[in-house]
Each structure stands twice: as C-alpha cells, then as structure tokens.
Image (cartoon, grey):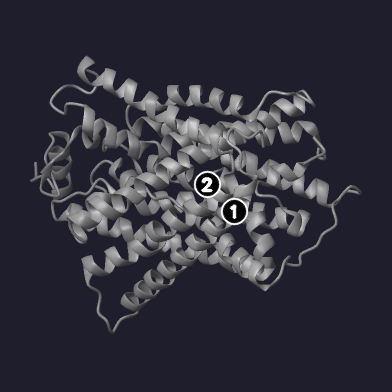
Amino acid sequence: MGAPSRDEEEAKKMEAGGDTVGQKLDAGALFVLQSKGSWLHCGYHLTTSIVAPPLLSLPFAFASLGWTAGMTCLVVGAAVTFYSYNLISRVLEHHAQQGRRQLRFRDMATDILGPAWGRYYIGPIQFLVCFGAVVASTLLAGQSMKAIYLIANPGGTIKLYVFVAIFGVFLVTLAQLPSFHSLRHVNLISLLLCLSYSLCAVAGCIYLGSSKRAPPKDYSIRGGTSTRVYGVFNAIAVIATTYGNGIIPEIQATVAAPVTGKMFKGLCLCYAVVVTTFFSVATAGYWAFGNAAQGLLLNNFMVDGRPVIPEWLLLMAELFTLMQLSATATVYLQPTNEVLEGLLSDPKAGQYAARNVMPRLLSRTLAVAFGTTIAAMIPFFGDMNALIGAFGFLPLDFAVPAIFYNLTFKPSKKGVVFWLNTAIAVIFSVLAVVASVTAVRQIILDAGTYKLFANV
C-alpha cells in the first residue's frame, strides 16, 4: 500500500482530536462538526441554509427596486455569493492541504487575520447572525401555523405567541440531533420542501394574477426621494439575507477528507435550486402584486382573513414552509450547539457518555427556549430580516471571503482577481454600513407599532 495522502492524515488527526490552528480540538469541533459527509450531504446543508422561506420576501424587495434594479440585484447576489462561497472553500482547502484544516469561521479569522479578529469580530457576528436566523425562523413558523389555523378556523382567537411556543417545543426535539452531519436526511427533505412551497407560491401568483379577482398591478416605486433611497438599501439588505449563509466553513467541516472539490459540487447543486426558486418566486410575486407585495408573499394570498387562491393550495404552501423552517432553524442552531458543546462537554469522554449527554440536553433546550421567547416577544420579521442581512450576511458572505482569499493566496496586483476581490470587499463593506443604518432607521420608524407579544 502507498503512503497515506495529506488529506487522509488530516482526517485521522481530526478523529483523534489532533491539531487545528495550533490547538487541540474541543468537544464542539469533535462532536458537532464531525467530518463524515459526502458532497451531496454538503449540498443538502447548503440548500437548507440558503434556500429558505425568506426567499418569499423577494417580491417585497422588488417593490422598492422595480423590475430592472430588482432583477439586477438578484443576478448580482447570485453571482457574488457563488463566487464568494467558492473563495472560502478554496481557502479552506488550501489550509487543509497545509495540515491546518479549519472547521469554523472564527478559526479562519484567527489564522488569517489574527486572534483578535476571530474572537471579537467574526465569531460574535456569526453567532449573532445565526442565532438571529433561529429566532426569525421560529417567528415565521409561528406565523405559518397561525395562518393554517385561521384557514381552517376563520375568526379563531388563539394568539401568535402560542403558535411560536408550540414550534419552539418541536424545535427542542430536533435540536437534540447530536451533530451537523446527523441532519443530512432532514436537509434532503428540506431541499424537496423548498422546491414544493416555491412551486405552490408561483402557482398561486399565476392563478390570482390572471383571474378576474387579480389586484391592480402597479409597478411604480412609492414615496418621496428619501423614502425611495432608504427603500433601495433596505431591499438590498433583504436580498443579502436571502442569499446569506454565514456557516460555509462549518458546512465544509462536515465533509470527509479528502475535501478538494466537494464543496464546489455541493454549491452547484445548491445554486441549481437557488436559480429555480429565487427567480421564479421573485418574478411571479412581483408580476402578480407589484408594489403591493407584502413582506412575506404568502400573506398576499389572504384578504380580509380569507384565501383568494384555492384553499388547498395555500394550505400546502404554508405547511411546506412550516416544515422547512424546522430544518432551517436547526441548521442555524449548529454554531450555538458547537459553542455550548465546547464549553460544557468533555472531549475525552464519549459523545454519548452521561457526562456529555445531560449538559447537551439542558443547554440546547435552554438555547431554543431563549430564542423562542425572543420570537414571541418581538414578532416583526421584516425589520429583523433587513437588520440581519445588513449587519451580518453582507460582511460575512460578500466582503470577508474576498479578503481571506487575497491574504491567503496573495494574487498579483497586476491581475484581475486581486482587484475584483478588492472591489467586492470595498463595495459590500460600504453597502453593509449604509444598509445597517437604513435597517435601524426603519426599526425606529416602526417602533411606535411595536408591542411585546403582539398578535400580528
């Protein structure tokens, strides 16, 4: 037999708790980020984290951009994120070949930018963004459950926070799945679900938009100059959230060695689904409702508490959305699980030893309970969606990958790659700052309508 390759040696080293970024692997890396998956599993994880129900907000973003700018932003978002995610994957593969396989975003920042960047910038932002996505998913799931309830029981009086709490109890169960890799079958089902509710949404738009009850189609952009400008940046933040991921290194960490090329295949699978769903939902939704598109497309299918498309079609769309949200929330809970496992578990004990199982059960239950409480208290998804995209996904998924690549590979300043990456990093850093200000402004404007545990 020939000598083992560097990737095979690295895989054995990881399984034994070997060296990563100069440190022994903690329980979070060993237990949550197990490297056992194939490129297909990687594709399932990517699709669940990117092609999620926030894509149903795309017609709402188009309402502030119009046809041309909206489609341009959608195409640019797809191209830049596909490119950026491949940059991160290339950097991760490079370090793995050098014997330093990085498993987490903060590991990359520590190794490339320095310990302070990993500890005080990338790590906290990723954690807040991912936990914010858990909160947003929980809130959306509660709203889907309430919509199903009202379709079946018009005039029902059960409040939104009750449905949010019910979903939270279910999420506690899913949260106990021990590792990211253990979600691979859940995320395959999630991939099928996102295709299903997107198809239902598009069918509903075509049905209503071509019927006698079709709403008037107005594609003008509402408001004065300042309102329109703020609306554009808010829409960009919404689109960034839709394309956002924030956990590319953690997903690549689930892939078994050798890792080379597997992430690219997974991204190709994911973006085939992205193109199929994002563009069809955005186009059909904006065509059917114009500037009256609501923050979540499915809300346009209810008028005065009654469905304006076939009831069975709306029920299917809401049910598929609800089911996928459980997978999306569980995926974005993984960075929290990894941190908690690293703090509370003993890497020398077995993953299923009583010493580790009890802290895992309690900590994950408390994390989900905390997120569920926030979702029930502050049920304003649109504003939350824009802020998460501006503050987190724009820098993490658009700007940082280009910086990591340039610092790692040091491409020639005379070449196209260096200046393309630099332009991406600068443009999207500026957009992140401006969009964050816009999102905060919108929250301030809407603050008068906020009410804890509101039944929206």
Disc 2 and disc 1 in contact, CB within 8 angstroms: yes
Q: Quadrant of the N terminus?
A: top left
Seen in the image, is 198 located left or right of residue 106? Answer: right
Farthest-out residue, bottom: 414
Q: Residue at x 18, y 41 (%)?
A: 11
Q: Which mark is residue 187?
A: none
Farthest-out residue, front: 448
- Visible residue check, residue 297: yes
Q: Position of residue 399 (x, y in %)?
A: 38, 64
Q: N-terminal of the two: label 2 or label 1?
A: 2
Q: Residue at x 66, y 51 (%)?
A: 281
Q: Name the foreground residue: 169 vs 451.
A: 451
- 167 over 379 or under it: above or below: above
Q: Which mark is residue 51?
A: 2
Seen in the image, is 305 located left or right of residue 56? Answer: right
- 105 over 172 or under it: above or below: below
- Visible residue check, residue 138: no
Q: Name the foreground residue: 2 vs 371.
A: 371
Secondary structure, mark 2, is loop
Q: Name the foreground residue: 277 vs 141.
A: 141
Local crowd at mark 2 within 10 Å, few (<14), some, or many (≥20)? many
From the image, tell me which residue sits under label 1.
Answer: 278
Secondary structure, mark 1, is helix
Identity, as a three-letter code, of the amino acid under mark 2: Val
The image quarter in which residue 116 lies:
bottom left
